[in-house]
Image (cartoon, coloured by chain):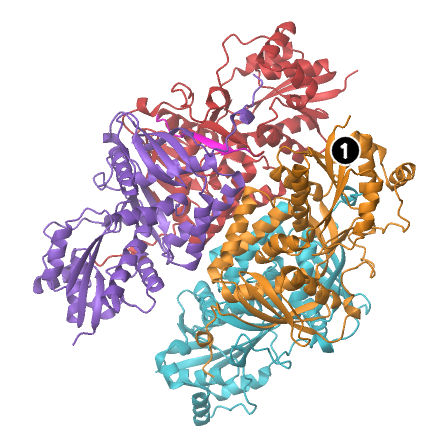
Chain colours: A cyan, B orange, C red, D purple
Amino acid sequence: MSKGTVVLAYSGGLDTSCILVWLKEQGYSVIAYLANIGQDEDFEAARKKAESLGATKVFIEDLRAEFVEDFIWPAIQANAVYEDRYLLGTAVARPCIGRRQVEIARREGAQFVSHGATGKGNDQIRFELTCYALYPEVKIIAPWRIPEFYNRFRGRKDLMEYAQQHGIPVPVTPKAPWSMDANLMHISYESGILENPKSHAPADLYLMTKNPEDAPSAPDVLEIEFKIGVPVKVTNVKEGISKDSPLDIFTYLNEIGGKHGVGRIDIVENRFIGMKSRGIYETPGGTILLNVHLDIEAFTMDKEVRRVKQGLGIKFSELVYNGFWYSPECDFVRHCIAMSQVNVEGKVQLSVFKGQVYILGRESPKSLYNEELVSTSPC
Amino acid sequence: MSKGTVVLAYSGGLDTSCILVWLKEQGYSVIAYLANIGQDEDFEAARKKAESLGATKVFIEDLRAEFVEDFIWPAIQANAVYEDRYLLGTAVARPCIGRRQVEIARREGAQFVSHGATGKGNDQIRFELTCYALYPEVKIIAPWRIPEFYNRFRGRKDLMEYAQQHGIPVPVTPKAPWSMDANLMHISYESGILENPKSHAPADLYLMTKNPEDAPSAPDVLEIEFKIGVPVKVTNVKEGISKDSPLDIFTYLNEIGGKHGVGRIDIVENRFIGMKSRGIYETPGGTILLNVHLDIEAFTMDKEVRRVKQGLGIKFSELVYNGFWYSPECDFVRHCIAMSQVNVEGKVQLSVFKGQVYILGRESPKSLYNEELVSTSPC
Amino acid sequence: MSKGTVVLAYSGGLDTSCILVWLKEQGYSVIAYLANIGQDEDFEAARKKAESLGATKVFIEDLRAEFVEDFIWPAIQANAVYEDRYLLGTAVARPCIGRRQVEIARREGAQFVSHGATGKGNDQIRFELTCYALYPEVKIIAPWRIPEFYNRFRGRKDLMEYAQQHGIPVPVTPKAPWSMDANLMHISYESGILENPKSHAPADLYLMTKNPEDAPSAPDVLEIEFKIGVPVKVTNVKEGISKDSPLDIFTYLNEIGGKHGVGRIDIVENRFIGMKSRGIYETPGGTILLNVHLDIEAFTMDKEVRRVKQGLGIKFSELVYNGFWYSPECDFVRHCIAMSQVNVEGKVQLSVFKGQVYILGRESPKSLYNEELVSTSPC
Amino acid sequence: MSKGTVVLAYSGGLDTSCILVWLKEQGYSVIAYLANIGQDEDFEAARKKAESLGATKVFIEDLRAEFVEDFIWPAIQANAVYEDRYLLGTAVARPCIGRRQVEIARREGAQFVSHGATGKGNDQIRFELTCYALYPEVKIIAPWRIPEFYNRFRGRKDLMEYAQQHGIPVPVTPKAPWSMDANLMHISYESGILENPKSHAPADLYLMTKNPEDAPSAPDVLEIEFKIGVPVKVTNVKEGISKDSPLDIFTYLNEIGGKHGVGRIDIVENRFIGMKSRGIYETPGGTILLNVHLDIEAFTMDKEVRRVKQGLGIKFSELVYNGFWYSPECDFVRHCIAMSQVNVEGKVQLSVFKGQVYILGRESPKSLYNEELVSTSPC
């Protein structure tokens, strides 16, 4: 007799595989849900694994296009940066993943959703706030906060043993001595050997960006066109390549940014629940877009509107970081910001080189720039 | 019969040389004042020139140390950035220059001060607000806003003719097709051929920083130590060089930043009086310090204090940009910010390479970072 | 040969009558424009006076309904209060008056507009910013800032003499020893004997509100219904009277507020151009609405949306005070605020008594109030 | 064998008497602590009651003077108002009570503190944040959040039965159909029959203020003198009475405000934990001081400093409401605000009448008001 159906956010990894089996043990029917938001993953292998572990259904959902359009684009419009440095790559992905998860839960009549986030991070909060906002009646099973679970699995060793006992394929490669979160926008690295804030990150950590020292010795020059504050086209000026769908644009900017080592940061940030945490991030395409959007916005937006909007963007960033994407205040702020972008339109030329983005020039039919007025000097 | 004494902010260039002579023609006694705030200048030549043009006295004042301590350091504490990008290199220099100018005017019994700033820029405002704040009774002579002056000198040609007629040495090298403002913190380039916001800046424009393409192919690794939010020591980890006075620290960071092409930006900004203006800036040492201060501050400051202080820093930046350094509200905000820095103490390691600053690690006796707490994963 | 046509904001008083004649003397064709925004005025007498002084046309425009709907209502939505106390009665009227004035100027082909505001107040700025925003090519004639005018008219005596010489009817009653500005929303009193901030205002100063000491000894009880943040109906619960058009609602609230002496304040405020100024205001209906809107808004708006909106309301108030109603930033802020009001709907009961407004209770179909949840005590 | 010593915030009422006995039953030694912050209470009776119930020690602490000086005065400096209306009378008292409670706990070697606040209100949070901030190692026992307790005491009836069984004196007068919190600054009323936000409050609810309808028919006229933003003297102009210690000043303002029915509000507010709550408050002296401080501050503070400080005051109010008096950010904001008050000095005359405070005039040696400058009219 089933306790009900759970939609589990399944990653294919050891943790959520153990959770899948454990939930079954507890008497739940488990639907495995795996969102493709651009991470490097063998989705078919994950599907088979989930099926073999007893998932009643498996949903592999390609959310990449909606991730860009519905989540990354508003962040770009907002110039969203948390605590002056972090571009919120994980934070904007959570509501995207959660939105589909509750859609599936509703559609499949599941009363429960579950996830493998730990009890000290931001992600549990982001995940759960999204679920409650969009499906208030849902019940959330967070195994890493349930004593029966976390007392049983006190470390990786316990999970490995459990996996062996229950026919869960055990990873053959050793786990990296840090944890990662990867999606189309960024990869984050934290904990493990990175926890000591004084230790330098290993040079071979980064998966999305080249080491700037090894990056090409000549820049790429791009032109990015914006409408209502979001990119509608990117052109590689020398190579003549251009992209014009949101997903293609963002993917291409990741490619160029990655090739030139753009968007690496090593920071200490304040988590929602107060503690400080050291994180290393690489956000190649997002870093290019932040710089370029700042430029076209400054070029086309009234000075005083910009000041008000800057404050709203900071508020937006805090809300998103803290998991409140689906909240009345974030809705409100997002709509205000969107309203500010009506004239943010035009083209920016830029070069990308050795970890840096250099703005070269800009033009716009909506420019508020007046070349005659600005001419300052009689000589 | 003299109309009174004017202390003229004299640069040694064509404009202020013509102004010096013109003021004498108008019946004023002229004291020439030239502030050394780190620009590349032959100060002795300028002294002789001013004397030969009839200045009754010439003051060449070395303000470099106080520029760093009293003006750049508070900007670093504030993470001062105007409109998300401009590090305020000119804006922080104006009150420093103006402060000494009114000191001289008071000491010498001069009722007037004068400057060569044009009528469309921010600098006239910054200069004049400083003078009025510190010497409310002073009268300001701004020739570029006086019809008799600006109608007579409608272009460089008029100035050149006037110079020839009055024995003012005429520059032999042709004027660059843009205008510049240089000091220890930055060089700005604007107007002339840069006015078209679409045109790319010429590659040979920059004087303070190497082109990143030509920068060394290996990074420099530095350690910067902070107390109360300002650097107290910089060490080049590999080379073993270290500096520990404010001026030496800043000068050394300019050297390292300049060598690696750090701190170049090309932006459109909103001037105080509303119009948009395209400016190109290079701020090597300031850019390094902004990044490093952000890091040590995040590491040692309470999350919520940081949020309040971030808002005050934005306010501070607007006030400084707009020339209000010496205003009750800027005083207030600056004191609040200084109060927030009491625990901003510790060391940051960083590398500087091809136009970028990379934070590598940090440590602090005042850290709020708790390595045990932050450990997130059971495996 | 006319210098062109001027649309003069004409009040019927001595100042603007002299200005009308003086403008004619200077060679302009003068159109007199008098806005009815609820002040107590003999408009037909003013029309005749303007015609007799040589106005080529006279426009008496009843703007009361649009003043309420387009200007007072947005201020109510914003809870607009300047410096925590002033309800902006004059500031919201200026853009209303100016809007129609430039409409007339455009329609009549006038290149000039003129007004009688002095050179030290806020109103000149509010007036002129409105005109330039809506009719950028217009030229403004501000006689009180023109040396030929203000040197000729150094005091009331000069105006009186000029009036007698030019057949301008001279006021027979002596001028009050202060100046006033009256409209549907408020009357302000300032200058003259009120300038000394220590002096108490005379008891007989107020024209719109009864002295609370003489007000009825029993309250009136009202119910006000709101939709999208603005009142749509007011009912006098005991008397059964109700009103439901914007102008009728506001007029009735003025009547009730005035009868009970509501909305008198005596403050020192900071004018746009820096100086402090003592002003006495009576704002009967506006004060009732501010209180009631605060209540229904708190009842129906999400907590965090309210915080963001509160900040926008303060910004809005500063912009309106400073004359920037028609500016990109005020448009932006006003639209954001309007967006926040979609659910501000419901009914508030209140009593009005001896200068005070007491909220008694509220209900709303959009309430976020949950009676079950809030129940706190087990006993 | 005792589980340890608890310092219980004891009120003398039914709830905390039951908690006292229950804690003993659980094996704790109980120290009863009762703070006198100006509420109307028979403190000696409470002492005897606590002793008779088995408290090992009883501390009755007169905190009235420090409540005014250390908590109410900073709120006055801040113009502290939560959500535009609530003067924070309960919120400023909690850290005052908690501070002494942890002092006692430390001094007496108690490892535990306990309180009778329920699990849905703000007070549990305010209380506990104070304790943890000042005594991080302390353990808090919150019976109303402990299942063994709240399941046993499901209503007043259970408490009454328990009281009878354990010799706890049972209140003879029936409980009011709402709950109250009283101190020197205010009385709040909520829950019970007040929970329905539409119901009007009963006329006989208020204990601190007279019904304005029954208040004297002539005003009292006061003069209040400020230094560094806090009152240093109050004088009743007609009666010649004056007070000059903080506690005497505040008590006298309560007397005058109470006599004239000043400071009654009926609001719906947003609690920390999100839900909306209807509260009725009377804050006679605090309301007078808020009005008067606003006036002297506007008179003596620079316009732009005021704007920055206004934002900090709103932040302060939110922090205090939410219980963060003892937090790094509240410390920071409070110090910034205090710094803004150095010149807030002078005298304000005001009248108090029928529920209202009317400012009549003000003077200051630090005034920024310039009577000559402000004179606006040529006639």
The N terminus of chain B lies in quadrant: top right
Residue D365 in which image quadrant: top left
**Is C343 inside the magenta-drawn segment?**
no
Residue displayed at 78% across by 66% down: B211
Q: x%, y% of residue D277?
A: 33, 51
Looking at the rendered structure, the secondary structure element under dot 1 is: strand
Foreground pick, B77 / D25: B77
Q: In this picture, which residue range is highlighted in magenta?
A: C260-272
> In the image, residue B294 lies at what x, y percent?
58, 63
Q: Amino acid at mark 1?
A: Ser
Frontmost residue, C228 versus D7: D7
From what the image shows, is residue C115 above or below residue B221? above
Q: In the image, what residue occupies the spot 83% across and 36% down?
A: B21
Residue B223 is left or right of residue C108, and the answer is: left
Other-residue count near label 1 (Cα within 10 Å), few / some / many at <14 / 14–19 / ≥20: many
In this view of the protein, which residue sits in the foreground, B158 or C319?
B158
Task: Give coordinates of residue C330: x percent, y percent.
Answer: 58, 41
Q: Which residue is mark 1?
A: B29
Is B318 drawn above or below residue B359 in the view shown? above
Residue B61 visible (yes or no): yes
Asked whether the viewer can see residue A246, the reply is no
Q: Is A25 left, or right, of C185 in this rendering?
A: left
Classify residue D248 by image quadrant.
Answer: top left
Decide which of C205, D291 is in the foreground and name it: D291
